[in-house]
Image (tube, rainbow, N blue to C red):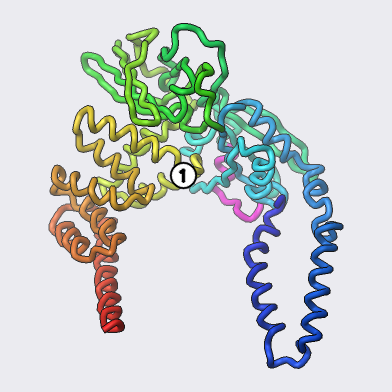
Amino acid sequence: MSTKDIRFILPVYPLLCIYLSILINSRNYKFFAPINKKIIITITIFLSLLISNKGLFLKNHRSDFLKDWPHAEIMTMIKDKTPNLTTTLAILPDTKEINKFNLEAEAARQGEYVAVRQVISNKDTYEKDLEYFDWFLIKTGNQGVMSNEAKNLLSKLLLKNSSFIIHNEWDIPDKSKLILLRRKTLNSSLTKENCYSSLNNINIKEIKGGLNISFFGKGLSINSSSLLIDLHGKEYSNKLNLALANGFFHKTLEEDSCYKLSQDIPIDLQDGFKKNLSIKARLLNKNSKIKSLDMKNKNLTLQNHFKDDSVLMANRIAKVEDLVFFLRQGKFKSLFELVGIINQSDPKQTYLKDAEKIYSQRYMDNNQLKELYSILMTQILQRRILEAEKTISLILEKDKYNGNTYVAKALINLYLFDKEKSRFAINKAKQLEKSLETEEILNTIDGLTYLLEMKFINAYKTFT
């Protein structure tokens, strides 16, 4: 459907048919005698066939609707820029013609190279939205029903930020302008190349605000693979984890064909930072097999350049560690807000599956608590609760005095209808240090366990 109005009606339509059928079949109304029912059914079938054949209701609706609007052109421009990858387009307006539903319908018609998401901004964090999308669509004039101050501020910020440029703009029928913006340097690009002997090699170089990864290899090596990069120096070390192309391949790459992948990774550095570092890189494939990669350069100088307003796209895998920080600190509001924006930018939540695989390998490497927490976070957000229950039990063997973590365990056990374990975790949390947000959640969970107990008591009485 090319308009959202009809999409809202469609889910209700079956209910209308059911209630109409009940009415027609009712014995309380003499009008609906058997002969009249047959006439009504015959007329309904005739009208349905007439509408479907002649298109009386939606005749040329899509072509008429899109004729003066650039929906198709927008999708084609984005697809042509990154033909082998899926891209997420963030849109700010929500008018009758320019909204998520209409653009998503056009994207589906063209092969789903573009995922369309409505940006849900707030006044406190709207500047962070620039980190999660390569493409934005903004509009002058009427912004529609979902407009707010945060979106207006975000529109102004996009137009003046040096990381984004106007890719194209259109004068549209409602006398306003539609503006398609893209990141000056897209986060990822993938091109098919001729094969040569030096496969599976990687070149890592410094760029402003982070690193650029250039990887050359066969499709078999690239499909659903991840990179584990270790930086080491005398006074500094860092472990970088990323999914190749953020996992946004439009389709499975040809296994025996060769490709060149370029991808940027942001790194936060302190003012005045400048270090000479050695680099090691490993490839973790879709089957969790890991191997070292040939490096074109095994050393680099990493430094913090003069700061400006430029922004690299966030590495979603690294953001899992931020989620873990919020969990351990009991900052659940911040946690949920960050999950929301990450999920907007990654509609299929590909980052969770990739992150679980990556942090599982990291835990095998170093057996550190923070890796276990990262695994836990991905399992919870994927609703893999049985696995999460096992992981959090391992965590609490090492992190026994964090009340915030016990609250997470209580929630997991409550989800599994295990009242006794949930109550145990609640009692432990009450004895330990925790945040104010955790205190509030704890009281709610406490009440839910008693409600669950009453439900089981009533169920037992019913069956006995």
Left or right for 147, reference 414: right
Left or right for 239, reference 172: left
Q: Position of residue 114 (x, y in %)?
A: 60, 37
| Amino acid type at mark 1 | Asn
Q: As displayed, is residue 455 above or below residue 374? A: below
Instruction: Please say whether residue 154 is one of the residues in the magenta stretch.
Output: yes
Left or right for 67, reference 161: right
Query: Mark 1 sits on what residue?
Result: 343
Instruction: Please say whether residue 264 is one of the residues in the magenta stretch.
Output: no
Q: Position of residue 72 (x, y in %)?
A: 73, 38
Instruction: Please tell me which residue lies in front, 418 or 404.
Output: 418
The residue under the point 49% across, 43% down is: 348
Look at the image and tell me whether residue 208 can be seen. yes
Look at the image and tell me whether residue 440 can be seen. no
Q: Position of residue 216 (x, y in %)?
A: 47, 15
- Quarter of the image that includes the C terminus: bottom left
The residue under the point 65% across, 50% down is: 101
Circle 1 sits in a helix, a strand or a loop, which is it?
helix
Instruction: Please tell me which residue lies in front, 384 or 170.
Output: 384
Dot 1, how many residues are within 10 Å of its Cα: few (below 14), some (14-19), or many (20+)? some
The residue under the point 64% across, 67% down is: 12
Chain part drawn in magenta: 143-156
Instruction: Please tell me which residue lies in front, 156 or 460.
Output: 460
The residue under the point 67% across, 46% down is: 105
Q: Position of residue 360 (x, y in %)?
A: 28, 35
Instruction: Please tell me which residue lies in front, 89 or 288.
Output: 288
